[in-house]
Image (cartoon, coloured by chain):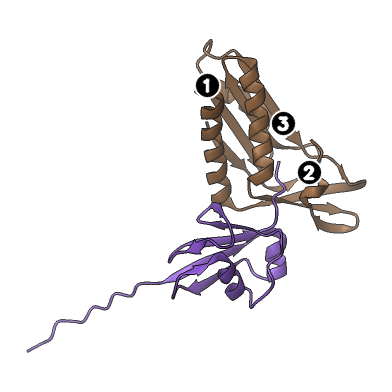
Chain colours: A brown, B purple
Amino acid sequence: MPAILLDNIFNPWDEIQRHQAGHLQSGHYGATATFVGTMRDFNISESVSHMTLEHYPAMTQHYLDTLCTQCIEKYGLDDCLVIHRFGEIRPGEPIVLTAAWSGHRAQAFDACRYLMEELKARAPFWKKEVTEEGERWVHNDQQTEK
Amino acid sequence: MTQPPLIVKLVTMSITIQFFASLREQVGKQQATLPYEVPVDVSTVWTKSTDNMDMPDNTLCAINMEYVNRDAMVSNGDEVAFFPPVTGG
């Protein structure tokens, strides 16, 4: 149930395969739900060339590790995985991956969404976008779409 | 008769403060250290470490990587963090 913080681009589909091969028992789980968040090239009607994702390293790792442990217990999962980028990110690059493995689909779907919603609400990351107008911090009322 | 050397053990009493994102820019520093003298709450740590700036209403606070309210008490050696609402994911 790792939570992984990365400062360079990653392939979420490779990570899912690698995690399944290394941490899960084939035949023991019946459902895998995944979510991948990808950087857009627009926000509030302006084009965005790239962004910097700042975080509070020790607290981020602690928060995400705790979240994964709680999620496995809450939904009775076989396992879960969270990967989150930090540093400079460009449009089209994945920002975040959440994945949940369980015996049945309901728990996997619910757990995958739970990981994502909790992470967005409380994990200490902050986005700073770069547009033609300059740099700006993203406020949480600018990314409320679900 | 030669006296044995006097050994003085210095115990550091301090609190570490961290500021992140837009709050770091407003405060003008990433980190500060305060001497720990008497028990203080998080609000007092903010006031002392920012030269009496008003704390923005939406500021989030943590002690040792756990979210806390502004009236939480701070102990010697703690790391206190202040940051704006999060925008990850």
In the figure, B11 relative to A82: above or below? below
The amino acid type of the residue labelled 2 equals Arg
Q: Give the residue number, with chain letter if any, for mark 1.
A: A78
Give whichever of discs 3 and 2 has the lower sequence position.
3
The residue under the point 83% across, 53% down is A130
CA distance for labels 3 and 2: 15 Å
The residue under the point 71% across, 62% down is B57
Q: Chain of mark 3?
A: A
The amino acid type of the residue labelled 3 equals Val
The image quadrant of residue B58 is bottom right
Badge 1 element: loop
Closer to the camera in the image, B81 or A2: B81
Q: Chain of mark 1?
A: A
In the figure, B20 relative to B10: above or below? above
Badge 2 element: loop
- Toward the front, the furthest residue is B71
Give whichever of discs 1 and 2 has the lower sequence position.
1
Q: Residues within 10 Å of mark 2 (few under 14, many from 20)?
A: some
In the figure, A65 relative to A78: above or below? below
Comparing marks 3 and 2, which lies closer to the viewer? 3
Give whichever of discs 3 and 1 has the lower sequence position.
3
The image quadrant of residue A33 is top right
Q: Quadrant of the C terminus of chain A?
A: top right
> Residue B86: x, y in percent?
69, 50
Q: Residues within 10 Å of mark 3 (few under 14, many from 20)?
A: some
Closer to the camera in the image, A95 or A98: A98
The amino acid type of the residue labelled 1 equals Asp
Query: Which of the numbered marks, if any, corresponds to residue A36?
Result: 3
> Residue B26: x, y in percent?
72, 68
Q: Chain of mark 2?
A: A
